[in-house]
Image (cartoon, helix red, strand yellow):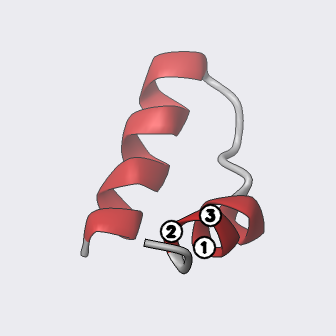
Amino acid sequence: MFIGQAYQQFERFTGIPAPNDLFAKVMSKY
């Protein structure tokens, strides 16, 4: 759920597609 929210917030804030694979890779470490 958290990763999905991060994708949406990133896209809304920046106006560009979120780097989904990068987000998942970073969050898998925590």
Q: In this figure, which residue is indicated by the disc labeled 2?
A: 27
- Check disc 3 and report the residue beneath it: 26
Pointer 2 with pointer 3, Cβ within 8 A: yes
Question: Which secondary structure lies at badge 3?
Answer: helix
How packed mark 1 is, by other alpha carbons closer than 10 Å (few <14, some 14-19, many 20 or more), is few
Q: Are marks 3 and 1 in contact (CB under 8 Å)?
A: yes
* Picture coordinates of residue 5, whole percent (x, y): 30, 56
Give the amino acid at mark 2.
Met
Q: Residue furthest top?
A: 14
Residue 10 point in image, percent of width and height: 50, 35
| Structural distance between the alpha carbons of marks 1 and 2 | 5 Å
User: Which residue sits at x=53%, y=36%?
Assistant: 11
Callout 1: SS: helix
Q: From the image, state whether disc 1 or disc 2 is nearer to you.
A: 2
Gap between marks 2 and 3, in whole Å? 4 Å
> In 3D space, how far apart are the residues under numbered discs 3 and 1 (Cα atoms)?
6 Å
Judged by depth in the image, the label closer to the viewer, 3 or 1, is 3
Kind of residue at disc 1: Ala
- The structure residue drawn at horizontal position 70% and vertical position 43%, both measured from the top left corner, is 17
Vertical placement of 14 versus 30: above or below?
Answer: above
